[in-house]
Amino acid sequence: MKKIEARNIHKSFQELNVLQGIDLDVEEGEVIAVIGPSGSGKSTLLRCLNKLETINRGTIIIDGELLADTSSTGEVVYAPGDESRRIACKMGMVFQQFNLFPHMTVLQNLIEAPVQVQKRDRAQVIEEAKILLGKVGLSEKADVYPRKLSGGQQQRVAIARALAMKPSIMLFDEPTSSLDPELTGEVLRTMRELAEEKMTMVVVTHEMGFAREVATKVIFMADGRVQEQGRPEDIFTNPKNERLQAFLQTVL
Ligand code: ADP
Ligand code: MG
C-alpha cells in the first residue's frame, strides 16, 4: 500500500519557485533517501508533506487519505482543519536541530504530546515511552534534562519522541547534520534499526553511506525538481543526470 502519494507539488515563496512539480511515491516499508545540493527544496518538500507549509498546486495523499488537492480552477483545497491535523500527525518528524523541550526531562519530552494532544492514557504512554527509550539505548536517561545529553543522545530522544506518537511514516530532515562526526554513527544506527523494522521513512541526508546501504530508493533533487531517482546501486554507480554526477563528485 502507498503511504505517501504526492503529485505535481508546487511551492513558491513570493517570486521564488522552490518546488516545481514534484512527484513522490512511497510504499509501505520503503526508505527513501532525498539527496541534492543545498537550497534545492528538500526541506520544503518534507514541510509540505506534513503541512508545516501549504502548497500552491498539487495533490498529497497520506495513507490513502486526501490531505490536499487542486480543484479544476487551480485552487488548493486542504482537508478540514481537524482532519488535516490528524492526517499530518501520521508523520513523525525529526529535524536537524533536535528541538527538545529544555525544561522537561527526557521522559516528559516523550509523553507530552501523546498525553496532551492525543489524549492517551498517561500510564500506558509512560510504559510505552520507557520501551522506546530502551530501543534508542537511553533507558538510563529517562529523568535527565536534555542539556545534560550529548547531541547524539538528544537526537535519539527526538527520534523516540516522534515514535511515541505512533506515526505511520517518519520524516527526517538532515538528522545528523548538526552533530559532531563521532556522534553521527549512533543516530544512523537507530535509524537503520527503524528501517529494519520496516518503518516507512523519508530521509533528507548528506550521509551517502546511509543512503547507499539503507535506502530502498534514492531521489536526487536540484532546482525544485526530481532530476533522477532509482535504486541506490544505480544512483551511486551509474548516475545518468549530469547534475547528479557533479553532485556525487562533491560528496563522495
Ligand atoms: P534544502 O533543504 O534543499 O537546502 P530548502 O527547502 O530549505 O532547501 O530551501 C529551498 C529554497 O527556498 C531556498 O532558496 C530557501 O532560501 C527558500 N526558502 C525556504 N523556506 C523559505 C521561507 N519560509 N521563506 C522564503 N524562502 C524560503
Ligand atoms: Mg534543508
Image: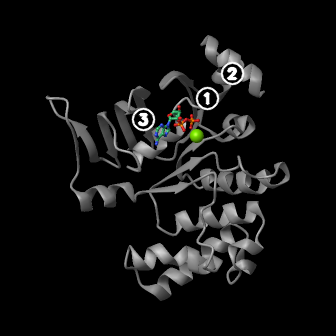
Q: Which mark is residue 247?
A: 2
**Whole-percent x, y for residue 252 in the image:** 78, 27
- The scheme the figure's colours follow is one colour
Which kind of residue does numbered mark 3 sit on?
A: Asp
Indicate the quadrant where residue 193 lies.
Answer: bottom right
Is 40 in front, or is 64? Answer: 40
Q: Which mark is residue 25?
A: 3
Closer to the chain start, of discs 2 and 3, is 3
Q: Which mark is residue 36?
A: 1
Residue labelled 1 has its Cβ within 8 Å of some atom of ligand 1:
yes
**Whole-percent x, y for residue 191 in the image:** 65, 53
Which mark is nearer the camera, 1 or 3? 1
Which kind of residue does numbered mark 1 sit on?
A: Gly
Determine contact: label 2, label 3, CB under 8 Å: no
**Secondary structure of the residue carrying numbered label 3:** strand
Residue shown at 42%/26% (left/top)? 17
Residue shown at 83%/48% (left/top)? 181
Reply above or below: 192 against 23: below
Closer to the chain start, of discs 2 and 1, is 1
Reply above or below: 94 against 35: below
Neighbour class for label 3 at 10 Å: few (<14), some, many (≥20)? some
